[in-house]
Image: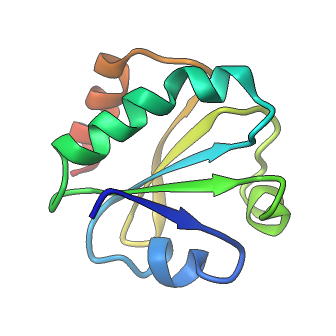
Amino acid sequence: MGLLNIDDNNFKKEVLESKLPVMVDFWAPWCAPCKAISGVIEELAKEYEKRLLVAKVNIDQSSKVATDYGIMSIPTVMFFKKGSIVGQVVGVASKSDFKKKIESSL
């Protein structure tokens, strides 16, 4: 499945209505820390394929979703299960930090 690009139009369907838990990376192309964690996000998408949906939201193109979820700083990674937020990481974090959040949301 890999990474899903999510926007204002499909956030509800792909994230809130997902049968799988979802990890959402809120990012922007100009954000250096976002680029720093993008490789880790891609690795996690492969490692947790079929157990976790990994999505990316470009806040420059999807400002409504970013505003709705109070994204004030990027990168922000949110974890959703059955439509509710079950975890969040703001800023750069290690792969093991992300894995702990993922495991607790599965």
Residue 31 to residue 4: above or below: above
Q: Nearer the viewer, residue 36 or 87?
A: 36
Q: Quadrant of residue 60?
A: bottom right
- Identify the colour scheme used: rainbow
Q: Residue at position x 41%, y 36% from top?
A: 41
Instruction: From the top left corner, tell me how far across and down residue 88 is, in percent.
Output: 52, 38
Quarter of image, res 81: bottom left
Residue located at (77% from left, 64% from top): 62
Q: Nearer the viewer, residue 39 or 55?
A: 39
Relative image position of residue 16 (x, y in whole percent)? 48, 75
User: From the viewer's perspective, is 80 left or right of 92?
Assistant: left
Where is 18 relative to 99, above or below? below
The image shows a total of numbered marks equal to 0
Query: In the image, 100: left or right of 98?
Result: left
Q: Report whether 46 appears left or right of 6.
A: left
Q: Nearer the viewer, residue 60 or 14?
A: 60
Q: Residue at x 17, y 41 (%)?
A: 47
Establish if 40 lies above or below 80: above
Q: Is residue 22 above or below residue 79?
A: below
Which quarter of the rendered picture does the N terminus lie within?
bottom left
Residue at 81% of width from left, 33% of height from top?
30
The picture places residue 31, in percent across and down from the top left corner, at: 76, 29
Residue 21: image location, x then y, percent? 31, 61
